[in-house]
Image: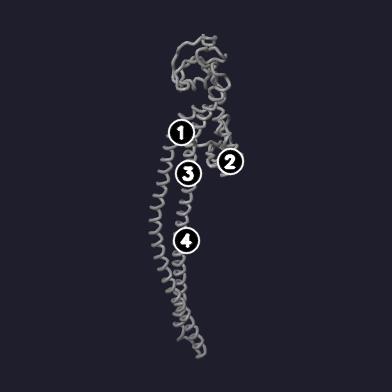
């Protein structure tokens, strides 16, 4: 009968289990280290049911102990302080894990963007090669058109040449001679153009070959960088799994209400919920922490937050 005044069955258990039991409200008689002395305590909702040792109750801030021999209030305050101090200690430990988790998640979130940028840069290079190849084809096409044009002109000059001796008058002869000269002159201009197009096509071909080689090297580099990013994401996932496991172990030490407050701040303040207020400054937003606030933090009566960034403040001791 644990809930009957004075009953105190001796059921030793580790202090760690006491806290867990409190959390789940399995109220039982427990064994606890209190002020460095091992004692059996009786945890009940009725004060004074355990005359041989302090009665312990659960409060939102932690364990409350009533020591009837020394007065209830002082001891309650002392234990509250001790407990809030340890809660802050657990929060700081949790924050160390969460800071790493937040940094890794941010890094991981940026990775798809990095891959996209690499793909875009590579795609641009591919397009540059495609443009060079098209330019080469255009030059070859223009040359073929000019060659066709030249053969037409040559054919015409040849035809006129054939007709030249069948002409009756000297005037007709002179006119046709001029026409032949014009056709030949046109042909000569076209020939120059063809030579120029040959020259341009050679240069374009060399440039295309160089670009192809460059692209091949770029492709190797691109695959290498992409692989590196994939490997990094895998390493981040592995580390996150480790950190999550550590977090699962660390979180139950923290009171649910305090944990909920911490989580809220963590979500809204870039993964940083608890910060040192060393040297009268908030290490979250660098704003001034007045001495009276520093005093409040050190009293450990309640959680104190920064008035500017709303993060929980603590003092390194
Ligand atoms: Zn702040």
Circle 1 SS class:
helix
- For marks 1 and 4, give the one nearer the viewer: 1
In this figure, which residue is indicated by the disc labeled 2?
Answer: 289
- Callout 4: SS: helix
Q: Distance between the residues labelled 2 and 1?
A: 33 Å
Residue 63 screen position, x and y as percent: 53, 22
In the rendering, which numbered label is found on residue 131? 4
Q: Name the residue under label 1.
A: 244
According to the image, what is the colour scheme of the structure?
one colour
Q: What element carries label 3?
A: helix
Q: Tell which tag, 2 or 1, sits nearer the viewer.
A: 2
Taking the spot 49% from the left edge, 20% from the top edge, the residue there is 21
Closer to the eye: label 4 or 2: 2
183 or 107: nearer the viewer:
107
The extreme right residue here reads 307
The residue at label 2 has a CB less than 8 Å from ligand 1: yes
Tell me which numbered mark, 2 or 1, is placed earlier along the sequence: 1
């Amino acid at each position: 009968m644990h809930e009957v005044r004075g009953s105190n069955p001796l059921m030793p258990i580790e202090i760690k289990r006491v806290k867990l039991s409190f959390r789940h409200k399995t109220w039982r008689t427990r064994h606890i280290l209190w002020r460095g002395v091992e004692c059996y305590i009786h945890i009940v909702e009725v004060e004074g049911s355990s005359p041989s040792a302090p009665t312990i109750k659960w409060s939102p801030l932690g364990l409350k102990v009533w020591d009837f021999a020394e007065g209830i209030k002082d001891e309650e305050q002392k234990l509250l302080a001790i407990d809030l101090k340890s809660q802050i200690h657990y929060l700081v430990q949790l924050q160390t894990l969460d800071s790493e988790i937040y940094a890794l998640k941010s890094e991981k979130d940026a990775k798809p963007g990095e891959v996209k940028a690499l793909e875009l840069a590579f795609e641009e290079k591919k397009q540059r090669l495609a443009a060079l190849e098209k330019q080469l084809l255009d030059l070859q096409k223009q040359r073929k058109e000019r060659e066709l044009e030249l053969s037409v002109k040559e054919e015409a000059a040849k035809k006129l040449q054939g007709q030249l001796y069948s002409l009756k008058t000297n005037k007709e002869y002179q006119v046709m001679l001029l026409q032949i000269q014009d056709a030949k002159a046109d042909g000569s201009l076209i020939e120059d153009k063809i030579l120029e197009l040959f020259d341009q096509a050679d240069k374009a071909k060399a440039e295309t070959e160089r670009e192809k080689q460059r692209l091949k090297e770029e492709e190797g580099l691109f695959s290498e960088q992409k692989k590196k990013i994939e490997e990094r994401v895998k390493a981040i996932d592995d580390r996150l799994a480790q950190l999550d496991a550590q977090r699962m172990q660390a979180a139950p030490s923290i009171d649910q209400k305090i944990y909920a407050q911490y989580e809220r701040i963590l979500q809204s303040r870039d993964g940083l919920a608890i910060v040192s207020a060393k040297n009268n400054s908030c290490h979250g937003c660098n704003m001034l922490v007045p001495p009276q606030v520093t005093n409040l933090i050190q009293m450990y009566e309640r959680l104190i937050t920064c008035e500017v960034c709303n993060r929980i403040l603590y003092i390194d001791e």
